[in-house]
Image (cartoon, rainbow, N blue to C red):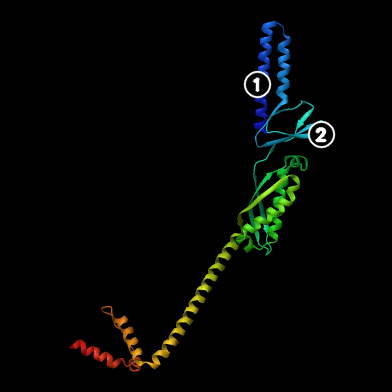
Amino acid sequence: MLENIQKVSSVGITVFVACAIAGGIGTAIWERPYPLVAGMLVGIYFLFAIKVAAQWEKVALLRFGKYVGLCGPGIFTIIPIVDTLSRYVDQRVRTTKVTAETALTRDTVPVNVDAIVFWVIWNAEKSILEVENFMDAITMSAQTALRESIGRHELAQMITEREILGHELQRILDEKTNPWGITVQSVEIRDVHIPQALEDAMSRQAQAERERQARIILGQAETEIAAKFEQASKVYIDNPVALHLRAMNMLYEAIKERGSMVIVPSSVVETMGLGGMLSVAALGKGQ
């Protein structure tokens, strides 16, 4: 608004100075004061009659209090005293920050939610004539809709489905603001704040859940290994030589490092027939 006043003042002052100079020249020529007075009056008239609106602005013109039409963008004139102007309406995309503090979710969890509303005035006439202050109306409507939406969702949904919550808020707000000539383009949920104690509890719950999943995976792996051992045992029952070779391979893997020692129970040696094979191996080394 201050920029508009500065624009109008600069244009009016320029016209006023031009008329005054013209009046001074006329005085110098005819040596009469009347041209100077006339020039000053014309300059004063244009000082209050000339108005300027920016490229993205519209303003409503009221004549004797009745709506006449929209003016702008660019330069336009009014009739002083007879005409009045409403507030200048910015038709660019605008943003409004909305905060819902200590709102309860569906599962009775207190949360603080920050959101941003992107909206634009598509009909300046309606926004001026239908609502007193569309900025306050949008802010209050957004806060109310945000609280209502929080109450219909659980905390997990709000954290993981922010986009769905934003679409729902955009639909609710657009239904309210569309009769005012305003369209809500989108609503973005910036952050969801929860109490610190609840955040710690959720962190411990997530850690316990991960540990449970790890134990389940380990148990499944043990079951699969046992099944494979069962299949191998059936092969070893029908083929003792394979069992002996497997035993020798296991012993080799255990003692291949220098200085290592393996203690094998005598029952295992007798069952697998390792005594004869170990004796043969020892004799081979002695020779």
Q: How many marks?
A: 2
Instruction: Give the secondary structure at mark 2.
Output: strand
Q: Position of residue 239 (x, y in %)?
A: 37, 92
Which numbered disc flags the more N-terminal residue, 1 or 2? 1
Against 7, residue 283 (above or below) is: below
Against 250, residue 149 (above or below) is: above
Q: Position of residue 199 (x, y in %)?
A: 58, 62
Q: Position of residue 153 (x, y in %)?
A: 67, 62
Q: Amino acid at mark 1?
A: Thr
Compute the Cα span from label 1 to label 2.
31 Å
Instruction: Say which residue appears at 62% left-offset and 63% top-offset.
Output: 156
Res. 262 visible in picture: no
Q: Position of residue 241 (x, y in %)?
A: 33, 91
Against 141, residue 132 (above or below) is: above
Residue at the extreme top: 31
Instruction: Say which residue appears at 25% left-offset and 91% top-offset.
Output: 279
Instruction: Say which residue appears at 73% left-offset and 21% top-offset.
Output: 45
In the foreground, 118 or 68: 68
Are there few (<14), some (14-19), or many (20+) residues within 10 Å of tag 1?
Answer: some
Residue at the extreme left: 287
Residue hosting label 2: 66
Instruction: Say which residue appears at 51% left-offset and 72% top-offset.
Output: 211
Report which quarter residue 101 is drawn in: bottom right
Q: Amino acid at mark 2?
A: Lys
Numbered label attached to residue 14: 1
